[in-house]
Amino acid sequence: MNNDYIRSLIEKGKRIDDRKLDEFRKIVIETNVSKNSAGSARCKIGETEVIVGVKFDIGEPYPDSPGEGTIIVTAELIPVANPDFELGPPGSKATELARIVDRGIRESECIDFRKLCVKEGEKVWMVFIDIYPLNDDGNLIDASVLASLKALSEAKFPKIVNDKVDHESKTNVGLKLSKLPITTTIYKINNNLIVDVNNKEEEVIDARLSVSVADGNIHAMQKGGDVPLRFDDINKMIDIAMKKEKELAKFLK
Amino acid sequence: MGKILFKEKDLVVPGDVLAEGMDYLPSGGCIREHDKIIANHIGLVSLDNNRFVRVIPLAGKYIPRAGDTVIGEIVDMSFSGWYLNINCPYEASLMVKDVAEFIERDADLAQFYNFGDLVIAKVNKVTRFSNINLTTKGPGLRKITGGKIITIASTKVPRVIGKQGSMVQMLKEKTNCNIVVGQNGIVWIEGKTSDDELMATEAILKIEQESHIDGLTDRMKEFLERKK
Amino acid sequence: MSYTKRNDGRKFDEMRKMEAKLGIIPRADGSAMFKVGDTIAIAAVYGPRELHPKFMQNPERGILRCNYDMTSFSVPERKRPGPSRRSTEISLVTEKALIPVLDLKQFPNAVVDVFIEIIQANSGTRCAGITAASMALAHAGVPMKDLVSAVSVGKVGDKIVIDLDKYEEDYEDGATDIPVAMTGNYDITLLQLDGNVSKDDFLKALELAKKGCSEIDKIQRKTLREFYKGVKNE
């Protein structure tokens, strides 16, 4: 399947798997993927599969926010998911993915960081969100965000026993997300805008814009790809993201 | 129909629109974008034959062209020849079959050109994959011994050489030095005394610094007279 | 609460004072400094030069490699020297911001290295870096079909503003920061956002970015021209 074939199909408004340009593949979201996590989820979009585990720990707050906890998002692009992923510390792709997921969650304030405070200036909860793609068939960003939000929704705090976190325990207390910042990545191929690319389509994209939307407000954006975007493109891409927010939110209920 | 949007010898910057319309063709230092000719280098623009828009870059690495005389340094050897640094993005190669000397099979190549040696060579061929082939077969091409080497911006080489070699000829006469100016910005100076070599060095660096100020030729004449 | 007056007295659509210099690093093939307010970025370009290790080479065209770094003393609280996740990401988006205007087809197997160093930081550092890098690339003679200029726009409290400084970026009632880079032709090559805005506000901010980038583009061109002032072929 060569790149020109995919491009020419898209010009005609078609895709190799018969989807429409603005159509997502089948989405399946499950929880309880990994027992030792405080909360975990798996998101499958077509054959792309990402699992996310949430862990809590107590740490010191940052000096400029003594009454707030925080989230720490990491993405590990393991060779399991894609033979092009190499072992070693996170490269730019993994770093970008983690930071895009982080931004949407952090900027939407769907988690109240002040509620993560245990003892002002001394002890706060740190929420670790670790993303592991298991199969990369394109569109890792959107799958990672959905899995992360589900894992966060399910996560339960561990007990604190004798002033230390008992990592093997679970309370009934969760995070209570105030909103769901859904990220939709819109990809540009020539002058066409499509969503949810698969592996083959991802190789021919010219540019992408990830837009995180919660309740109609934009909380994060990230442009990627080597080709510039016109003002007009961005306008249309935001509209698509707004539309998809409503559709994708259903899978998180 | 078309429109020229510059005056002869204007200084242009990447992105500057030089001409509109399909009548004009880009001929160096500029490109066509749809129906416009756009500068893609900082340089001086001119119109040739009323059709070709040309920008002479004022900056940039030396890009080797077949026929150029260059001065390079031996940085590597293999059984088939030598590799030289000629101050451009790629190493150049000098194959055994392209040197003036006769080299016996199994000879020790280092006897002819060794690491660090400087060679005046001609660019024979540049392939699509940026393989630059040099040759030392030809008049004046050889390993350099003695004298000194200075480096100038390759974009200034035409000024140092001058119209039909007039500038470098004047330098040679007034300083009593042998001077070879490589297109890659490496210049070899060999004089009878080190004072002569120093004068030639200063003169060439002066040309490099002041190439943009009018009246260069006269100024250089004056400078060389004064120094004698 | 309403943000009625900017912290430093600027108008909402007014940029901080800007300054640009070319050729500040003699060893580099191209170099430039760009200062906006108290943010100072320097960029050095080395290349095109042969790329090692060989397996990273692209036989069809040269590649661009950008590295964004902040000196440890550029910020009030000492920053540990070396790369961070933030600088890794900024290096990536900087490369994406510049590559669309470069023509590296005539440099197969070669690399153009761009090193950006933030000497002093008061917000807008990645934008200042991209602006400086664009001038440095032109100075190095890398073929490029346009310059790239970058500015941060955003929403501080309830106002749409251009060129946020640190105070505004950290504004306690909320701020949305939107770094944007575009070519002289208004092609957008960098776009990021973090905060909370409606689509309308975002589009207003983008228009403001267009205005700011035009201003910066003028400064870049003026700086390049003046460096070669008086150049004429005899």
Image (cartoon, coloured by chain):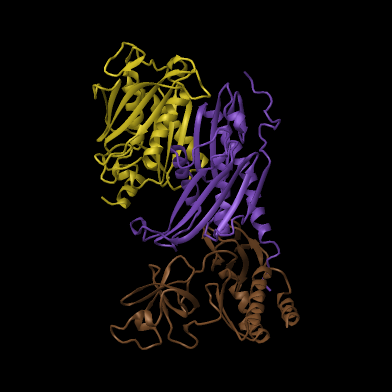
* A75 relative to B66 in the view: left or right: left
Chain seen in yellow: A
Observer-nearest of B36 and C229: C229
Instruction: Give the position of the C terminus of chain A as an image quadrant.
Output: top left
Whether residue A189 is situated above or below residue C208 in the rendered picture: below
Q: Residue at x 36, y 26 (%)?
A: A128
Percent x, y of residue A217:
48, 24
Observer-nearest of A245 and B183: B183
Percent x, y of residue A54:
33, 24
Looking at the rendering, which quadrant does residue C136 occupy? bottom right
Observer-nearest of B183 and C225: B183
* B193 relative to A8 in the view: left or right: right
Q: Residue at x 33, y 43 (%)?
A: A202
Observer-nearest of A65 and A189: A65
Percent x, y of residue C205:
58, 33
Whether residue C88 is situated above or below residue A183 in the rendered picture: below
Residue B36 at least partly seen:
no
Percent x, y of residue A209:
43, 38
Q: Residue at x 43, y 38 (%)?
A: C85
Specify the colour of chain B. Answer: brown
Chain seen in purple: C
